Amino acid sequence: MSTPMGFGRMHRKEDARFIRGRGSYVDDVNLPGMLYGAILRSPHAHARIVSIDTSAALAHPKVKAVITGETLAGLNLAWMPTLSADTQAVLATDKVRFQGQEVAFVVAEDRYSARDALELIDVEYEALDAVIDARKSLDEGAPIIRDDQEGRADNKIFDWGAGDKDATDAVFAQAEVTVAQDMLYPRVHPAPLETCGAVADFDKVTGKLTVWCPTQAPHAHRTLYALVAGLPEHKIRVISPDIGGGFGGKVGIYPGYVCAIVGSIVTGKPVKWMEDRSENLMSTAFARDYHMRGEVAATRDGRIQAIRVKVLADHGAFNGTAQPTKFPAGFFHVFTGSYDLRAAHCEVTGVYTNKAPGGVAYACSFRITEAVYLVERMIDVLADELGVDAAELRMKNLLRSEQFPYTSPTGWEYDSGDYQKTLQLAMDMAGYDALRREQAEKRERGELMGIGISFFTEAVGAGPRKHMDILGLGMADGAELRVHPTGKAVLRVSCQSQGQGHETTFAQIVGAELGISPDDVEVVHGDTDQTPFGLGTYGSRSTPVSGAATAMVARKVRERARQVAAAMLEASPEDLEWTVDEAGGSWTVAGTGAGKSIQEIALAAHSNLELPEGVEGHLDATCVYNPPNLTYPFGAYICVVDVDPGTGQVKVRRFIAVDDCGVRINPMIVEGQVHGGLADGVGMALMQLMAFDEDGNHLGASFMDYLLPTAMECPSWELGETVTPSPHHPIGAKGVGESATVGSPPAVVNAVLDALRPYGVRHADMPLTPAAVWRAIKGDPIRTDMAIT
Amino acid sequence: MQVPASFEYERAESVPHALELLERYGEDARLVAGGHSLIPMMKLRLAQPDALIDINGLAELSHLGVDGDTLVIGALVRHAALLADEVVGTYFPIFHEAERVIADPVVRNRGTVGGSLCQADPSEDLSAAFAAVRAEAVILGPGGSRTVPIREFHVGPYETVVEPGEILTELRVPIRPGAGSAYEKVERRVGDWPVAAAGAYLRLDGGVIAEAGIGLTAVGAEHFTAPDAEAYLIGKAAEEAVLREAARIAAESCEPQADQRGPVDYKRHLAGELTYRALSRAAERSGS
């Protein structure tokens, strides 16, 4: 694959180190004299701590320190703020509130001793009744989970709504047809290949703290450490090395990070803490857990009028969701989806339960995953009610291209779209009519085949700082670009890659703007001492925000180059035009052949060339990009399944995914991200789940129980694209990292339920395991979030 | 990171040496072959043996072949080797069909037939397959070797008749001309333990069933089999109604437990459905 000058397919620059095993993850960081930490966790979902005896652990010859909540309370660090301005226990002092909660931290000379010493800590618990079923969390007499909060008398975190309730109710009151459906988007987990961990190194002499940690938001972590621990921010360096997948689960600060830091301060040695797989699944940020009731009002001839939704949101024991402050339910209120409605309204109630905190993790675009699932399931429910084809119903109600920019009933301004074209392409690729004929023939023979459609609109790239911040930090991103005298460039960006290929795509953006090869651009990221401030990578914001910052800073460099070129050419800057050909970019005097290449200009900018007044020399530039709006990628997905009625097994036969993410910087990387997201969707729809028994025992705490899909469950993905550039993004790009994870689950579920239509099954909750499908056929559906009994 | 508690490690140089090491370390020693169940249990500290005796180097336990009218499978034969062996596939398609759905290639490359049986997980696939074909297990101890019918090998979940100080050395399976066999499994995902699985073995004689074996796993079937259903089949034609009725009897005899793989009614249903499917294909494969 040859290296293109700008956008196009090129191999990922970072893969050279990954395929040689030369990546460097946090667990690869080894420092002289480093100690190892391990966390003692609660076996109970809800219990009062009566006493903690650490004496036997401290007597272990290789143990250097044992830290408890009491130790931390002495440092005012027993509790820390969450990203939703709640508080979370670092190490429990009063009560444990979920199974797997952090209780004590051992620091020892090696991993084995640290783990051995955990068994020497004696904790006496007084077990309490637990709140596990979110639907019972607000019952009278339910145990109060957050009695640490002054005056708290229930488990409600918030009531929040969006849209116009009265207008929506008025449409419903007059509607020819209404449908309603309860559905659960179950609790799932991003389950990255690399678990969380940290190496903390506090230098007592310089007072400098260095933390290596796989964080998706290194700058935000630095600021939070400064605010929480009172450490001076310029003495904190957060290094996010190579990350083995994040998906939103590595945005927040976990108790283990704080413990590693305290461990290093207490012992004076670097401390490494790496959680194991079960710890990762039990205690780090979950995703979803939305109990939803959707209602649609429509005309008899299939024109959708209004949607209203009620949500019970299970946030676990601490409200730790990472989302813009204004929006406690994330961007869920984009639930009107891709359709032209008169009115919409949603009410979301957030509750505490005795489960791990988290909330918006797993490639969900701040709850758009839940929103898209709701609306796309509801469209199929309506199609079933009306007896019309699900594709036809969507085609009829999709927004039309001339309606953009479009302001939705809940206040979103969709920047661009051409939805019918995208859906039609997906249907053409699938051979939709032929599939429906095949399905009809199979039904005659008693065979179950299903075709499911999902059309999604995403809202990504948070966001305009006026509306969007996290803990007061505005969601704008910085970028710095240095161009060396020989015309080679170093780009420094605030966001950190978790595997998306930023070192390649951002180099391609610079390459396209400056007319140089991406091979001549080095991308530096993930180290707060080396990069400008920004809010990190999640919510598909890398390309919409940091990618835009990259384009803008390159344009600044290009303008500086114009000034220098004018001096070189003894021409007026206004008379120069920028051209890029196979040889690269150059500023040329209009109408003449005279011009200077960007490399010649770079050298001259550092030379003794006499520059006009006001032109500083050098080409380096910085910028901060504050996005004017979100970007709105969209797509049409079609899934074809076969279901074995005797066993309930589902086989995904085909999956067609047409994505429109605007301009594609590197189509290969886009396709790779789509492939991953589609596999995620198959996993969530068919197998992945974190259920709990009534005592709060976690029933998915290993990969034996928490199932990730393999290649065997995935068909050969059939991808297509349409391109509707974002009108406000400098290069017309939109984020794509989460599109497939958002869009694919409803396509799979709709396909399975389409297959079950002969049995009159309108809905069944994810995951559609063989047992769940068989029980749905029997008319006795399983409640998937609780233990099967 | 999951780390096991400390333990001694010994590598056995021969079968007698392994027996000697077992005697030396006593009850809290464990043999390790593929280690794909034991090592994860140790890492989770669900198992904390004092010593591991590694028998991976014992070539004399890795034999696989036909001895007269018996298929002989050494206890250390890897799943992948059983799956790759053409003779096994010719006489006993049930083994190939079961092996194909046991875990994944990585596990099959290291995991062993004997290890799977001795782990005695109530959801283990080969336990059902060997029960269906009525294999015999050969167990060697300080006093010499003894042979145990496989249907008497398991005494409960994670428990077998192999005593501390003994080693399972091989499995012996009688080869009978004209017999057919098959294995059916439902799993939530490839590599998962079965929700339910059934193996079937049928030999027809003069158009009627002369010999029948049914193996069931993950559904609480005593000794991984269903003797009443087997007895019902003897002397009858292998036709749909008969096989359906046998499957129903087999399902009735199970005592499945609900877990996240499924509720009791579904598992019982699967026991019947999969028994029927396995019997049907075994019948198709049996001669005459």
Image (tube, rainbow, N blue to C red):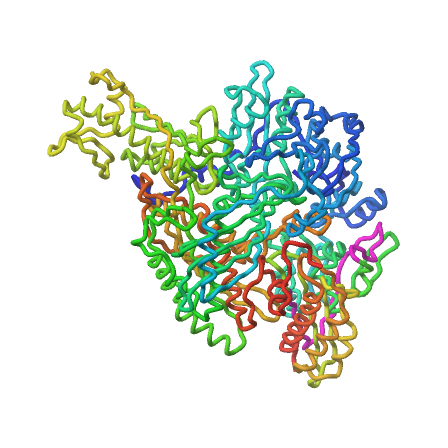
Quadrant, the N terminus of chain A = top left
Q: Nearer the viewer, residue B93 or A488?
A: A488
At which x and y percent is residue A262? 64, 25
Please state the extent of the stretch shown in magenta in the rendering.
Answer: B157-185
Report the quarter where the C terminus of chain A lies.
bottom right
Q: Is residue A766 magenta?
A: no
Indicate the quadrant where residue B186 lies. Answer: bottom right
Q: Which corner quadrant of the image does residue A712 belong to? A: bottom right
Q: Is residue A50 left or right of residue A182?
A: right
Tell me: residue A642, above or below residue A373.
below
Q: Position of residue A329 (x, y in %)?
A: 52, 44
Can residue B57 be seen here?
Answer: no
Q: Residue at x 49, y 29 (%)?
A: A219
Q: Write down the quadrant of residue B229 in the picture.
A: bottom right
Most distant residue in the top direction: A205
In this image, A767 relative to A537: left or right? right
User: Which of the pair B181/B48 is nearer the observer?
Assistant: B48
The x and y percentages for residue A22 are 50, 35
Q: Residue at x 72, y 46 (%)?
A: A130
Decide if residue A96 is in sight here: yes
Number of callouts in the render? 0
Instruction: Pick whichever, A773 or B192, lies toward us.
Output: A773
